[in-house]
Amino acid sequence: MWGRTVNAGVYAVTVWIALLRGINVGGSHKLPMADLREMLTSLGFGAARTYIQSGNCIFESGDGPAEALAETIESAIAARFGFRPRTMVLSKDDFDASIAANPYAAAGAADPKSVHFYFLYEPARNADLSALDKVRKANEVFTLTDRVFYLHAPEGIGRSKLAEKAEKCLGVAATARNFRSVTSIAELAGS
């Protein structure tokens, strides 16, 4: 199991980050963050906290692997709130590694909303990068790794055809966060 462990007496715990996809967007799949934190605590996760309303959670647990934790969270939300958001769980160390690997860190520091991390649910082995290259603006750049698709869109994500088509061309599900959110989540998690 990957993760940053914290010695909590007899037991070692790992700091985890859960990214929920598609909640509190456009008035659907409403999930108040206070309720989410309470639910995580009721599942036995420690130090549950959230960042903004889009489903970014930090918690501690001795359990793993990440996929099992995601399944536990998805099932609990389905039982309690009546919908099942796709959930990605990453260890704190894996999350930090994705930030360290960001090739557009300087651009993100200058304009945090221009750089986006698309966290991939699985490696995009059959990505159609030539299709992405065809729709990108001249000032847009992207990098694909096994875990993250990084996008720098200086004119904004809302105006980017590349951003609009990214997931389809990657051929795998992803959940996106901008540079500001990613660095804020890391700070909240104790980087």
Image (cartoon, rainbow, N blue to C red):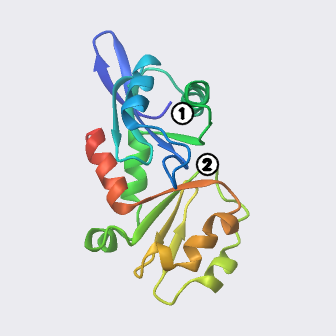
**Amino acid type indicated by mark 1:** Ala
Label 2: few (<14), some (14–19) or many (≥20) C-alpha neighbours in 10 Å: some
Q: Position of residue 64 (x, y in %)?
A: 52, 26
Viewer-proximal residue among 119 and 165 = 165
The amino acid type of the residue labelled 2 equals Tyr
**Residue 93 found in image quarter:** top left
CA separation, marks 1 and 2? Answer: 11 Å
Taking the view exactly as shown, the residue that stands out farthest to the bottom is 138
**Where 127 falls versus 76 (above or below)?**
below
Q: Secondary structure at mark 2?
A: loop
Task: Decide if residue 96 is on the left or right side of residue 125.
Answer: left
Q: Residue at x 62, y 36 (%)?
A: 83
Q: At 29% across and 51% down in the image, what residue appears?
A: 184
Q: SS class of the residue under badge 1?
A: helix
Q: Quadrant of residue 36?
A: top left
Residue in the image at 39% along x and 72% along y: 114
The label on residue 66 is 1
Q: Which mark is residue 16?
A: none
Residue 12 or residue 70, whichever sits in front: 70
**Residue at image mark 2:** 121
Q: How many numbered circles does the render carry?
A: 2
- Image position, residue 189 (x, y; %): 30, 39
Q: Relative to 178, say whether 48 is above or below.
A: above
| First in sequence: mark 1 vs mark 2 | 1
The spot of residue 4 in percent (x, y) is: 36, 33
Nearest the eye: 33 or 109: 33
Say whether marks 1 and 2 touch (CB < 8 Å): no
